[in-house]
Image (cartoon, rainbow, N blue to C red):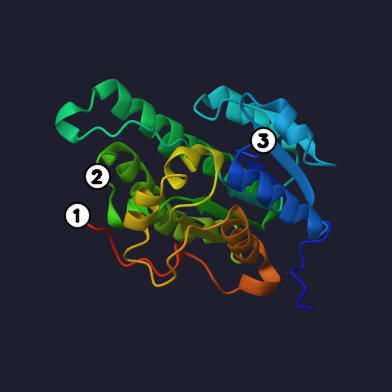
Amino acid sequence: MMETGLRGKRILVTGASGGIGSVCVREYLAEGADVVAHYHRNREGVEALGDVQVVQADLTAESEVDRLFEEAGTLDACAAVAGVWPRPDEPVWELSLARWEETLRLNLTATFLTARGFLRSVERTGHGSLVLVASTAGVFGEAGHADYSAAKAAIAYGLTLSLKNEVVRIAPLARVNCVCPGWTKTPMAREEIDDPEIVDGVTRTMALRKVATPEDVARQIVVLTSDELSGHVTGQVVVVAGGMEGRTIH
């Protein structure tokens, strides 16, 4: 059996009450890690995950993120999973500035503040692994969700690729990577994945014509977190979407 080397490592998971975040927590616990599970509103959801330290914060509020990292203590790794997909399908000509700004705040700004908090921890400890979570919307775009696509593209490319070069200034072996899930069986997407027509459309350009499970995504995050398995992997954007090559347009 291949060892991840995560036993005893202290790992923060943001969005731990969500579909992918909660499975990340369980996977890290299975590896023997010491997990700090973040939530915004659903405390019961994270308390049900097991022996974890529970921390609450609005990740769009700078002071709350600062407090979160103070409460979390010294960390070895962070999985920045928290994010929000706005369900209504709105083309740009109908997209309000309010929704645009809110979507960027809930996804891009929250991820930036999380990454900044963790890298400040890395500066103190001299080591660390950060895994950001974006989306295939940031790789291929998503009609009706330009706000979400723009936020996730910024995370996957602008932020990830900048941070992997910056972090080695304070910790030469520290790493930053990104996972881009495609359609995944989570509560956030349940309405869509229960519709066979939608599933047929979104899987049409996938070699593996199926929707991912949260475990598919969480295990890739665990692999990238591990210095044993991914110690020479940094600045990579791993798409977990069954070999997806794009989107059908018509």
| Viewer-side label of 1, 2 | 1
Residue pointed to by mark 1:
249
- Residue type indicated by callout 2: Ala
Is residue 187 depicted above or below 230 in this figure? above
Residue furthest to the front = 196
* Quadrant in which the C terminus appears: bottom left
The disc at residue 143 is 2
Q: Are marks 1 and 2 in contact (CB under 8 Å)?
A: yes
| Viewer-side label of 3, 2 | 2
| Viewer-side label of 3, 1 | 1
Q: Residue at position x 80%, y 40% from top?
A: 52
Q: Can residue 124 be seen here?
A: no
Q: Residue at position x 70%, y 72% from top?
A: 228
Q: Is residue 152 left or right of residue 171?
A: left
- Residue type indicated by callout 3: His
- Residue type indicated by callout 1: Ile
Q: Are marks 3 and 1 in contact (CB under 8 Å)?
A: no
Q: Is residue 165 left or right of residue 150?
A: right
Q: Earlier in the sequence, mark 1 or mark 2?
A: 2
Residue pointed to by mark 3:
38
From mark 3 to mark 1, how far is it between C-alphas?
Answer: 37 Å
Callout 1: 10 Å neighbours few (<14), some, many (20+)? few
Is residue 188 depicted above or below 67 in this figure? below
Q: How many marks?
A: 3
Q: Is residue 170 left or right of residue 33?
A: left
Residue 41 image offset from top left, x and y in percent: 63, 23
Is residue 250 depicted above or below 6 in this figure? above
The one of 207 and 70 positioned closer to us in this rendering? 207
Q: Residue at position x 61%, y 30% from top?
A: 66
